């Protein structure tokens, strides 16, 4: 009498990444941001731009009241004129002294003194000319100009406020190169370079953007104990604006694995294997265990998407046994 087919429960194989992607929330920032300040001190007279304004290189952004610095320019011009007049007198004295020395009417020491005075007068003219040039530069620095093309992201001073030289009054960003800034715990640092990354912005979650690791902070934040990591977005679309919030997902570069319930795994001394159902017969398929958990196991081997594998009681079966499938479930639903 032929043996009746043995009833079996099987799981249908579906492949999944070997590791679940890790995700970190972040904000889109410009790669290059600059704090802009006047190179002169004084009261801000006018401001020509607001937050969000797009500016071009050399465009006037704000202006300091130039009255005080204009007075310093006038004083420097007067000092230069006085130094030049003194230099002309000293040179004339030096010329007359040289003539008298040649005629023997004065001593050499007297002539040397006149020549030294003339050279000193010439140096004072050079010093006064440099002071005037510096004063004129400071007058030009009362106008704050954009150092490059960009977008104004912050205003830190207003018209009527007195600011010092070098005090930041605006912040400007270059939007052409955008990146995502995230905070990463130290345990995730080894995964950064090993996998590929993509950014998913909360504004459009269905449109992931390719991301590339650009920079990892050399030191952890003192309060958060996390590392600031920047991912560049070389193909960022126009709608990905500065300040948008999103998530950077890290995917490990590894071959996908088949997820099965741990009860499907069998080892009879020749290594781990599973029973694959072919028609009404069983075929032993050697596998490699990528990860073994309490309820599920991740396997690599000669398995294909959609294959059916015995998921319960494989130790009770033999190769070539005739079987009858009584229940089929997706591997992901088995516990």
Image (cartoon, helix red, strand yellow):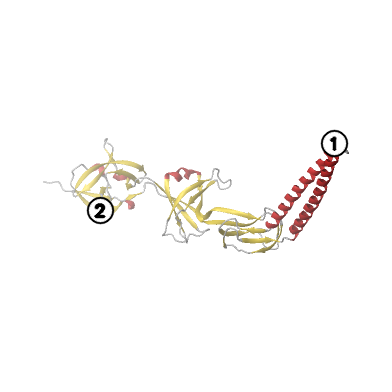
Q: Residue at x 50, y 49 (%)?
A: 230
Cα distance between the residues tagged 1 and 2: 123 Å
Q: What is the residue that sits farthest to the left in this orientation?
A: 1
* SS assignment at label 1: helix
- Disc on res. 108: 1
Q: Residue at x 76, y 50 (%)?
A: 128
* Residue 178 in the image: above or below residue 254: below
Label pair 1/2, CB-CB below 8 angstroms: no
Q: Position of residue 87 (x, y in %)?
A: 80, 48
Q: Quadrant of residue 142?
A: bottom right
Q: Position of residue 299 (x, y in %)?
A: 32, 44
Name the residue carrying label 2.
327
Badge 1: how crowded within 10 Å, few (<14), some, or many (20+)?
A: some
Residue 152 visible in this rendered orientation of the protein: yes
Left or right for 206, reference 51: left
Q: Position of residue 77 (x, y in %)?
A: 76, 55
Q: Quadrant of residue 65?
A: bottom right
Residue in front for this viewpoint, 170 or 144: 144
* Residue 106 in the image: above or below residue 16: above
Q: Quadrant of residue 112?
A: top right
Badge 2: how crowded within 10 Å, few (<14), some, or many (20+)?
A: few
Residue 40 visible in this rendered orientation of the protein: no
First in sequence: mark 1 or mark 2?
1
Q: Residue at x 53, y 55 (%)?
A: 29
Q: Position of residue 101 (x, y in %)?
A: 85, 38
């Amino acid at each position: 009498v032929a043996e009746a087919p043995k009833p079996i429960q099987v799981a249908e194989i579906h492949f999944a990444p070997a590791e679940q992607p890790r995700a970190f929330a972040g904000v889109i920032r410009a790669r290059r941001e600059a704090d802009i300040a006047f190179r002169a001190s004084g009261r801000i007279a006018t401001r020509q731009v607001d937050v969000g304004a797009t500016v071009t290189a050399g465009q006037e952004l704000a202006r300091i009241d130039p009255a005080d610095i204009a007075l310093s320019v006038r004083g420097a011009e007067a000092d230069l004129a006085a130094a030049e007049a003194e230099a002309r007198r000293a040179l004339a004295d030096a010329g007359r002294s040289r003539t008298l020395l040649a005629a023997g009417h004065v001593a050499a020491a007297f002539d040397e003194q006149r020549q030294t005075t003339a050279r000193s007068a010439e140096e004072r003219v050079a010093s006064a000319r440099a002071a005037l040039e510096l004063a004129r530069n400071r007058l030009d620095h009362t106008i704050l100009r954009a150092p490059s093309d960009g977008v104004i992201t912050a205003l830190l001073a207003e018209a009527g406020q007195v600011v010092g030289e070098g005090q930041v009054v605006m912040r400007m960003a270059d939007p052409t190169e955008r990146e995502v800034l995230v905070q990463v715990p130290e345990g995730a640092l080894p995964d950064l370079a090993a996998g590929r990354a993509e950014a998913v912005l909360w504004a459009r979650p269905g449109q992931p953007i390719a991301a590339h690791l650009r920079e990892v902070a050399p030191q952890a934040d003192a309060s958060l104990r996390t590392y600031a990591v920047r991912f560049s977005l070389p193909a960022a679309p126009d709608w990905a604006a500065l300040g948008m919030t999103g998530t950077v997902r890290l995917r490990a570069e590894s071959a996908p694995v088949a997820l099965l319930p741990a009860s499907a795994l069998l080892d009879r001394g020749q290594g781990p294997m599973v029973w694959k159902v072919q028609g009404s017969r069983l075929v032993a398929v050697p596998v490699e265990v990528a990860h073994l958990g309490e309820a599920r196991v991740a396997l690599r081997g000669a398995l294909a998407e959609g294959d059916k594998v015995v998921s319960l009681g494989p130790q009770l079966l033999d190769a070539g046994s005739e079987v009858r499938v009584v229940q089929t479930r997706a591997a992901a639903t088995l516990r």
